[in-house]
Image (cartoon, grey):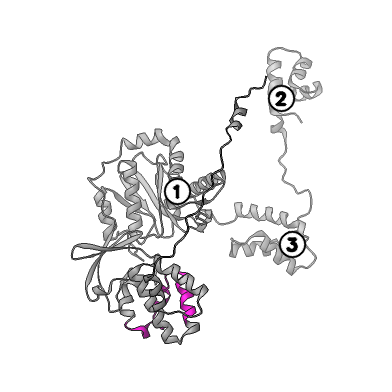
Amino acid sequence: MVTDQQVRRLMKHLSDQRPLGVAAAQAGMDEKTARKYRDSGQLPSQGRVPHTWRTRPDPFAAVWAEVAAALAVNPGLQAKTLFDQLQRQYPGRFSDGQLRTLQRRIKVWRATEGPPKEVFFPQVHPPGQLAQSDFTHMGSLSITLAGQPFVHLLYHFVLTYSNWETGMICFSESFESLSAGLQQALWELGGVPQQHQTDRLTAAIPPKSRTDTFTTRYAALLRHYGLEGRLIQAASPHENGDIEQRHHRLKQAVEQALLLRGSRDFADRAAYAAFLRGLFAQLNAGRQERLAQERLRLGPLPAQPLDPSKRLQVKVGPSSTIRVSHNVYSVDSRLIGETLEVHLHAEHLELWYARRRIETMPRLRGESQALIQYRHLIDWLVKKPGAFENYRYRAALFPSSRFRMAYDALRRHHPPRQADREYLSILHLAAHQGEALVEPVLETLVVHTDAFTGATVEAHLAGPAPSRPDPEVAIAPVDLTVYDGLLEVDV
């Protein structure tokens, strides 16, 4: 088939006064063909007749009205669904190989008669103007720490002009995580953009709010950094398009880095965090030129970061517990009836009393959970052993599997109430003398003793510590002659 390019070459040679045969040979076509195009003065594409006719009968012509009616009611119907329906309505009329024909017809219908598609409008992002952030779940990457699944989120921050990005590991979409992540990003960046846009997080906007009114704490955070807050419309994640796209790209980059690393397991959280920091540095390396333009327009940082914690006043109940963010925490029984100030951080909470920090404990994730420490309660529980059997948080009174095995052994050899008293006396010893001392005693007694009591454990603790012989270490003599082989040179 002769192409337009060949004909143009032919015309050029003819305009240079070359003979027809020579020009045809140089254009790569027969002389008769060259004469035809010389006389017509048209390119091959100009002489072609558009192919508007069918080469075979349309197998769906008789039923197309049904298909079009179904699509008009529900444009989201897939061609495979409609094809299966036609096969059920007209048994034996349509073969499986005709599915592709129906798919093509429906594709044309969608493009010519279907509903209009959503239009995305490219935006112009001046340097230093806008930053976007959001939380993203990292579960699809199957990260493990020391072999255990590490369920977590990432607070992700990006500048829309340069695409400079950073992130912070977190475990909930709380205000504390938002505040800590945003402040960490701004101080790492070294400046403040004009605007910050995020999703309609409950940490930033009151739940079910129909306005763009920010929560008091989020508004205070924005004021501290001189940021103008922007929110997307409800159910419109595409308005946060830059960060949504960076979520996708970042996870792809993490996936590829994990494949190169050859393992998804990390020794601890610090090792995983270092891996992410290295990846962010690698991704940002190619954005330095545009980042430099952004930094010229960034505002200054404040004198110091804002405390991201939330302050709460809570009263200790008669069960020696407090309730914080829909979760229950135990405290020392001496604080019953007192009011504590709780500093709620993203991953821990601090308890303050009389202007002194008296305890720090991990923050529970989710709601309706409890963190009960037996040391807070055991002094009174040994005085009220009957409360142990039906205690709501009894599972928390077994600090390890050894203690649970010891309790089960006590139940086998003693009446239930006596077993409870003996176990509580053992737990009392662990609280005051240390789990590390009590646990090996329990291991020995469970394996080698038919029946034991709290007094038995106390007697073992009072006795001399079992002597353990020093391990013998044998070091083989070093054969220095093996190093002579390193000095040999092949000639």
From what the image shows, is residue 318 above or below residue 258?
below
**Where residue 51 appears, x then y in whole percent?**
72, 43
- In the rendered image, which quarter contains the C terminus? top right
Helix, strand or loop at mark 1: helix
| Badge number at residue 62 | 3
Q: Earlier in the sequence, mark 2 or mark 1?
A: 2
| Badge number at residue 426 | none
Residue drawn at the location 41% of the way across and 41% of the way down? 164
From what the image shows, is residue 262 above or below residue 419?
above
Q: Is residue 407 visible?
A: yes
Q: Which residue is mark 2?
A: 6
Q: Which residues are magenta?
A: 383-410
Q: Which residue is mark 1?
A: 271
From what the image shows, is residue 121 above or below residue 10?
below
Q: Foreground: 99 or 421?
A: 421
Q: Is residue 302 left or right of residue 30?
A: left
Q: Amino acid at mark 2?
A: Gln
Q: Amino acid at mark 1?
A: Ala
Quarter of the image for residue 309 reads: bottom left
Residue drawn at the location 37% of the way across and 78% of the way down? 425
- In the rendered image, which quarter contains the N terminus? top right
| Dominant secondary structure (helix, strand or loop) of the stretch shown in magenta | helix
Say few, some or many: other residues with alpha carbon within 10 Å of mark 1 (under 14 / 14 to 19 / 20 or more): few
C-alpha gap between disc 2 and disc 3: 45 Å
Q: Foreground: 26 or 389?
A: 389
